[in-house]
Amino acid sequence: MSLDEVVQEVKAKQRLWEKEIEQMRSRKFATICVHGAYTKHEAIANNQGAIIEPVYASTSQAFQNSDYLEAALAYKIPAWAYSRIANPTIGYLELMLAMLEAYGTTLKTSACCTSSGMAAVRAACEPFLTDEKRGKKNIVSMAQVYGGTFQLFSERFAKERSIEVRWVEDPGDADEWKSKIDADTRLVYGEIPSNPGIALFDIERVARAAHAQGAPLITDSTISTPALCRPFEHGSDVVVHSLTKTMTWSGRAVGGVLTSKENIVSDVVCEEAKRDFAGWVKLWPLRDSGACISPDNASRVLDCIRVLRGTVSLLSENALRVAEFLEDNDCVDRVNYPGLASHPQHDIAKKYMRLVDSGANCFGHLLSFEVKGGHAAARRILDKFEFVFQATDLGRIKSVAVIPSISTHQQQGAEARKKARIPGNLVRLCVGAEDAGDVIDELKKAFSA
Ligand SMILES: Cc1ncc(COP(=O)(O)O)c(C=O)c1O
């Protein structure tokens, strides 16, 4: 068999699978979460009929002859020659995530899984910051981003590489974004909602401002998950998630993903990267950085995603009850939860956060609140919790709480915390699937003590 014949044969098989995937895309969100790209034919023809995606713990794939090997290594046929670059279990997860992020649209999307959420954030940003095209460059980002992302931008990009980072201090104000984006802006970055300040931005308006200057909008949608918000349909070019969070609510895996839609906006990356950014990152820069997810972790993520819609709905219902309790409590100065009418960006939250396939607003599991009496009082309350764990974690099936200023956002320093509106008395509470009444009792006991 010649190399060309090998390519034709493998591509014909691939087309059959693509047709099945297309059929799955027409089904409801919950069905896609259960099955994804692991179709009946895929199970029977390629996986000995296993009904759940097998965990391919093998490092590499054997080929029947040198033609197949050559075609695979030239990326001419879909293959998984070496697991740092591709692996079937990871591939099933990537196809599932690409489908979920495009749900409800006709957009063509692709996904690239990474070893952690931070690896996804970095892999999404780096290609826009190369020096090949122009010297001057800046990033425009909301200040209220996750502490790790803040450090990446301020330490690694600004301090080490002199890339200007322009912080947007009021992310709800689209005009502030617009005023900071210019022809030297390489990328625009936001979280919806942010961790732990629970701030939101208007994806549509910010994407328009970014595109007008030839820059892509990268959205971190970790806290919403595709069950509540799919930023592509509103204009975002690239979406990143920490899979470590709600997507793997069990708390048994660390991982990340960057997804992209076809033909992203950018003045700096090559045509291939523009056409299929996530696919390009997977085959080239991620191949070289080596920040791949493990097949074992990918299978754990897949298992949690199967019930993502129901889990997000339950956690959101519980979080709203807890937020309403906190808002009425004398020990609390302020509650940040997008589902409360008092939230400064409640209207933006209503526009973007809806439980998929129901249309009903639903605001996620993450809230934060400021305790009266300052930092010491916040510590006393946390120390009184009995079943709510103190942990730098979120999106769990179990409720967890933390004081961001001494944990997740400790290293960014007092000045940066002020910019990001993270006072010392702020408690971040991620509401789990326990009975909401029990979580409220836990809070009542802590407050009364
Ligand atoms: C919004 C957000 N993005 C990214 C990350 C980084 O994810 P990981 O811890 O998987 O690297 C986090 C972690 O908490 C996060 O909350």
Image: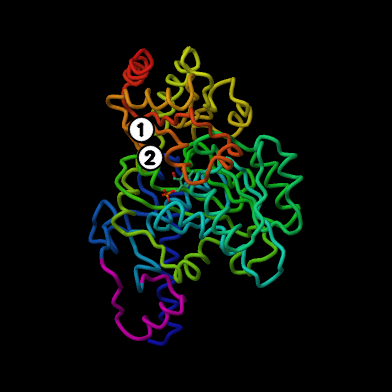
Q: Is mark 2 within 8 Å of ligand 1?
A: yes
**Where residue 414 sits in the image (x, y, percent)?**
54, 40
Quarter of the image that includes the N terminus: bottom left
In the image, which disc is placed on residue 400?
1
Q: Is residue 437 left or right of residue 354?
A: left
Q: Is residue 71 magenta?
A: yes
Residue 399: quadrant of the picture: top left
Q: Residue at x 33, y 28 (%)?
A: 433
Task: Name which residue lies at 52% across and 49% down.
Answer: 149
Which residues are drawn in magenta? 58-80
Q: Amino acid at mark 1?
A: Val
Residue under circle 2?
393
Number of dots carrying numbers: 2
Figure check: 137 above or below 441: below
In-image side of 443 versus 122 (left or right): left
Question: Mark 1 packing: few (<14 Cα in 10 Å), some, or many (20+)?
Answer: many
Residue sitting nearer the eye, 49 or 309 = 309
